[in-house]
Amino acid sequence: MAARVAAETHRIRVGSGGVLLPHYSPLKVAEVFRVLGALSPGRIDLGVGRGIGAGSIEAHALAPGSPGGGDDGDFPGRLAELLAFLHGGFPEGHPYGRIQLMPTAGAPEVWLLVASPQSAELAGRLGLPVSIAHFGRPQVTRSVVEAYRTAFDRRDGSRPRVQIGVGVYCGPTDEEARRVFASQRLFRLRMGRGLLLPLPSRRPRSTACGTRWSRSPTKWPSGRGAWSATPTRCTRCSPR
């Protein structure tokens, strides 16, 4: 997607949002984004995260040869490898220090995608900019920003940079936008129960998969409510 967007544009920056590093080889990620950077000089950003983003079976299938099948326990080490492949910096005698990536130019800027103070502190110690998943855990955004700024390493003169990721749901009318939002709420509810199913229908009173739609008392900054979805018992989308 990043390659296509960059090919169709000329000035905007294009980035990944993002590469879940526990699933991929740092060397491969560095090679792919160096190529993107060479094709669109100065316009490519590499967003990386430590989340698994899948169940244990899917995680193992994505990284069958890695210890833990994509476990994020070694994320700091993988991130350090990625940065070293992109910008150099392997210690003397490190076996990977002899690897020469092609192309030699085009290293992207790396952003760390964070949703916890611990990940924010890691980004701060490495002097990396961060993109915060406010759409996923808005209640921790302030503490994440504070942890990042406190831990930030300013020795090379750089300054902390924070990007906030918010969820935006659009439609030709307010009512249609609420219906789109309601589908996303039901999707996240199912995902929280371990049910990785397609995005549900956005029809306001869908009966598919035993779903009931109703008006929610939840109020957002606009002061308006939203549609909410309550799944009923269903062999395809509800736990037994």
Image (tube, rainbow, N blue to C red):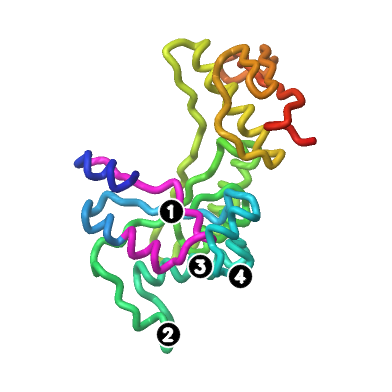
- The amino acid at mark 4 is Pro
Q: Position of residue 163 (x, y in %)?
A: 46, 43
Q: Which residue is mark 4?
A: 67
Q: Is residue 11 above or below residue 167?
A: below
Identify the element where label 4 is drawn: loop
Tag 2 or tag 3, which sits nearer the N-term?
Answer: 3
Q: Which amino acid is tagged 2?
A: Pro
Q: Is residue 28 magenta?
A: yes
Question: In the drawing, does residue 183 fall left or right of residue 229?
Answer: left
Q: CA distance from mark 3 to mark 1?
A: 14 Å
* Residue occupying image coordinates x 41% and y 67%: 83
| Residue under the point 62% across and 62% down | 71
Could you tell me which quadrant the N terminus lies in? top left
**Disc 2 marks which residue?**
95
Is residue 158 placed above or below 229 in the rendered structure? below
In the structure shown, which secondary structural element does the residue marked by tag 1 occupy? strand
Q: Report if the CB atoms under discs 4 and 1 are less than 8 Å apart.
A: no
Label at residue 111: 1
**Sequence-first disc among 1 and 2:** 2
User: Quick check: 210 above or below 143?
Assistant: above
Task: Give the spatial CA distance, label 4 vs label 1.
Answer: 25 Å
Which of marks 4 and 3 precedes in the sequence? 4
- Amino acid type assigned to the residue bearing label 1 in the image: Trp
Does the magenta-highlighted stretch encompass residue 164? no
Count the marks: how many? 4
Q: Which residues are magenta?
A: 11-33
Q: Which residue is mark 3?
A: 78
